[in-house]
Image: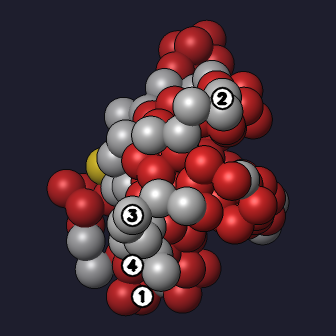
Amino acid sequence: LKFLTQIHSEPFINVKSVNISLYQHVEQLEEISRCREKLKLLGDYLLTCRSGAFKELSKRLDQRSYLLESPHTYSVMDIRQIAEGIFETFLQSLIQFASNHVYQCDLCSQKGFICQIC
């Protein structure tokens, strides 16, 4: 039990490596995978903004920076929150923040390229 408590928030479960067909069989996990991809792309876009939006996004991640790095890596806490139905809401709030910034920021909206989501 102590071990599980220690690794609770460590991202060591790679769904793609463990069983990629989980995305096809678990509808909620498939949607979360799409959200993770969007979040990663938005994070990459915000990284180029000088306004500090990426720093704010990082704060909102609450020490889950891996969510911007690998869309298939999860922690035990993430899996638990998926089962409880709150992880997708958390991701949606991050996506909403990031996309609102991209649309409302003068710097981001005037860039000569479009984010990969658009």
Label 1: few (<14), some (14–19) or many (≥20) C-alpha neighbours in 10 Å? few
Q: Amino acid at mark 1?
A: His
Above or below for 83 versus 34: above
- Comes first in the chain, label 2 or label 1: 1
- In the rendered view, does 19 fall on the left or right side of 55? left
- CB-based contact (under 8 Å), mark 2 and mark 4: no
At a point 47% along the width and 80% down the height, the residue shown is 118
Q: Residue furthest left?
A: 17
Camera-side mark, 2 or 4: 2
Camera-side mark, 2 or 1: 2
Q: Using the rendered image of the protein, determine whether residue 64 is visible from the camera's viewpoint.
A: no
- CB-based contact (under 8 Å), mark 1 and mark 4: yes
At a point 37% along the width and 66% down the height, the residue shown is 113
The residue to which callout 4 is attached is 23
State the quadrant of the N terminus: top right
The residue to which callout 1 is attached is 25
Residue 18 position within the rendered picture, expressed as x and y whole percent measured from the top left: 24, 57
